[in-house]
Image (spheres, grey):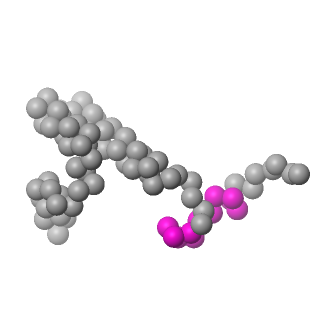
Amino acid sequence: MDKTINTAQDIKCESISSQCRILSDEGIRGYYKAGYRNLVSEYSRMGILDQKQRERLDEWVTRDLHEDTNTVEYGQLLQGLQ
């Protein structure tokens, strides 16, 4: 059996509902969680966030509130984007 990987063909996904999945739902959540943590860390390093803000946002991500559309922060972000 040929084990050659045709990467362009093997990982091509036409839509989110496609059968092709690179990451599980939990993997996707972990990927975004890591990204949020990296942003918080970088913004803190740049001096955009102080220690208290960094701790608050780290806790926010730890409690998975970054996925909750019912938080005050989500409402503020949504307003800022409109």
The residue located at (11%, 32%) in the rendering is 52
Write down the region rendered in magenta: 8-18
Choose top left, top right, bottom left or bottom right for residue 35: top left
- In this rendering, is residue 32 above or below 80? above
Q: Is residue 38 visible?
A: yes
Choose top left, top right, bottom left or bottom right for residue 53: top left
Q: Tell me: 29 left or right of 82.
A: right
Q: Tell me: 52 left or right of 36.
A: left
The residue located at (15%, 37%) in the rendering is 56
Which of the pair 66/50 is nearer the observer? 66
Q: Name the spot of residue 43 as percent of width and height, x first.
A: 23, 37
Count of numbered circles in the view: 0
The residue located at (76%, 51%) in the rendering is 5
Q: Name the spot of residue 8 as percent of width and height, x first.
A: 68, 59
Choose top left, top right, bottom left or bottom right for residue 7: bottom right
Does residue 3 show up magenta in the picture?
no
The residue located at (33%, 38%) in the rendering is 38
Q: Tell me: 21 left or right of 29.
A: right
Q: Can you say which quadrant of the picture contains the C terminus? A: bottom left
Q: Name the spot of residue 44 as percent of width and height, x first.
A: 21, 33
Magenta: predominant secondary structure element? loop
> Which residue lies most toward the right here?
1
Q: Name the spot of residue 31 as percent of width and height, x first.
A: 42, 46
Which of the pair 70/42 is nearer the observer? 70
